[in-house]
Image (spheres, helix red, strand yellow):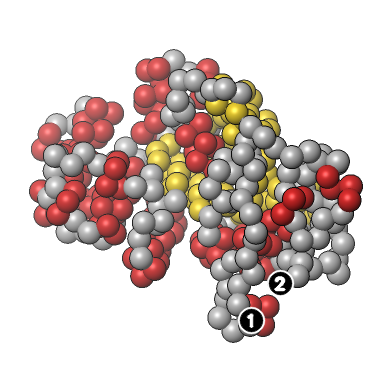
Amino acid sequence: MTVLELRDLRVTYEGGVPAVRGVDLSVARGEVLGVAGESGCGKSTISNAVLRLLPRGAKVEGQVLLDGEDVYGMSFGRLRAVRWATASIVFQGALHSLNPVRRVGAQIAEPIMLHSNATRRAADRRAGELLEQVGLPARRARDHPHQLSGGQRQRVLIALALACGPRLLIADEPTTALDVMVQAQVLALLSSLVRDMELSMVLISHDLSVLGSVCDRVAVMYAGRLVEQGPAAAVFDDPRHPYGAALAGAFPRVGDERFRYGPRGLPGDPPFPGDLPGGCEFHPRCPVALDRCATTDVELTALGDGRSSACLRAAEPALDLRGAS
């Protein structure tokens, strides 16, 4: 069963800036989909588009289907219910997402009362249970956000996202502001919640190694489009697009001969969405680009085994898409 489906999603910001350009994605029940890419590639725009959280000036085309229902055809009342009961979001900055002057338990209890008509006592009890579910004592419900560490605040935000029992959880860079040890704990928590609660999840990150270890499938974005997609381990171990290879190479594995002399960087920055180069948008930074890459608009093409790539050289089996060090 498909929980989320994006059909030719296009998002254009005010001033004609194309942030997302024709993205097709789907997430099945119980599946974890990773979305990778550098800042400015359109990942967060997709997450906000799913629940109509984009700014007023944004133009959205295509379809966003939650359980087969188009989000952009919903009334505001229907959308309000869907935002908590069907899908919810964990943002990357917990300190910015939580109200600093309210106790965290009250913030978790609020959507429970609004969406289930629960009493204050029942909602408070449920808030305590949710905190325990994410690894915090129920007594921390009396704390304000500033009394918690960064990892604890992120756990509170996860509890808040789970308050109304959604079927889809969108985690937008949930561990960016955390140190490595806490990051591992939060990712382990998300993985266990997905498994125990039979949730679907979209995990957004620039770190392909994280997605490779947590997700079932990974979609790699560049300049607002998908450039590679496939099983998570395959995308990380054997990328079929040079951009995916660059992301994988930036996060070395200890003991892997490919990273013996250090990670391989990627020069330059993603293009500004309002000033995209012709042909393949990645060709100015690509270590294995051909002359025709500058003039050929490459579409995402199936390679078999659930994999697809938008690279003219993706099917060359002997080609090292990482290029030179």
Residue in the picture at 36% in, 70% down: 181
Which quadrant of the figure has residue 28? top right
Q: Are marks 1 and 2 in contact (CB under 8 Å)?
A: yes
Neighbour class for label 2 at 10 Å: few (<14), some, many (≥20)? few
Q: What kind of element bears circle 1? A: loop
Q: Quarter holding the N terminus?
A: top right
Image coords of residue 306 (percent x, y): 73, 53
Q: Which residue is mark 1?
A: 261
Which quadrant of the figure has residue 296? top right
Residue closer to the observer: 275 or 69:
275
Amino acid identity at mark 1: Tyr
Q: Which badge, 1 or 2, is on the more N-terminal residue?
A: 1
Residue closer to the observer: 34 or 251:
251
Residue in the picture at 21% in, 33% down: 110
Q: Quarter holding the C terminus?
A: bottom right
Does 98 sit left or right of 179 as displayed? left
Q: What kind of element bears circle 2? A: loop
Q: Is residue 235 visible?
A: no
Farthest right residue in view: 292
Kindly identify which numbered label has been placed on residue 325: 2
Image coords of residue 56 (percent x, y): 45, 20
Does 286 sit left or right of 178 as displayed? right
Residue closer to the observer: 119 or 140:
140
Image coords of residue 249 (percent x, y): 63, 68
